[in-house]
Amino acid sequence: MILRHRLRNAFHSRPGAPGRGNGPRPQASDIILVMMAGLLVIAAIVKILQG
């Protein structure tokens, strides 16, 4: 019975439970790629505005 209780709590966590995200966490490589894409967009905008 204790095992069933632990398994149920592991799969159905409360929405406000601390330390648990609502979805999969993004990897560091994904964050770096998004930041680099943002820098490219900013650089393109600056180049267009400067002429």
Image (spheres, rainbow, N blue to C red):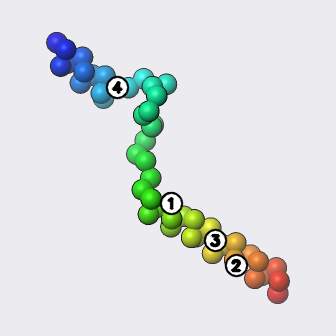
Pointer 4 local density, CA inside 10 Å: few below 14, some 14–19, many at least 20: few
Q: Residue at x 45, y 37 (%)?
A: 22
Q: Nearer the viewer, mark 1 or mark 2?
A: 1
Image quarter hosting the N terminus:
top left
- Residue 20 tag number: none
Report the disc number at residue 31.
1
Rendered position, 35 above or below 12? below
* Mark found first going from the N terminus, 2 or 3: 3
| Residue occupying image coordinates x 30% and y 27% | 10
**Circles 4 and 1: CB atoms closer than 8 Å:** no
- Residue 5 location, x and y as percent? 24, 17
Query: Can the viewer see residue 15?
Result: no
Q: Residue at x 46, y 28 (%)?
A: 18
| Element type where label 2 sits in the image | helix
Q: For the residues marked 2 and 3, what is the alpha-carbon distance in whole angstroms?
A: 9 Å
Q: Which residue lies under the disc numbered 2? A: 44
Indicate which disc, 1 or 2, sits on the residue closer to the N terminus: 1
Q: Earlier in the sequence, mark 4 or mark 1?
A: 4
Q: Alpha carbon of mark 4 to alpha carbon of mark 2: how far?
A: 46 Å
| Residue type, numbered disc 1 | Ile
Q: Secondary structure at mark 4?
A: loop
- Tell me which numbered mark, 4 or 2, is placed earlier along the sequence: 4
| Gap in angstroms between the C-alphas marked 3 and 1 | 12 Å
Earlier sequence position, callout 4 versus callout 3: 4
**Badge 3 density bin: few <14, some 14–19, many ≥20, Cα 10 Å:** few
Residue corresponding to mark 3: 39
Give the residue type at disc 2: Ala
Question: For the residues carrying marks 4 and 3, which lies nearer the camera in this image?
Answer: 3
| Numbered mark located on residue 12 in the image | 4
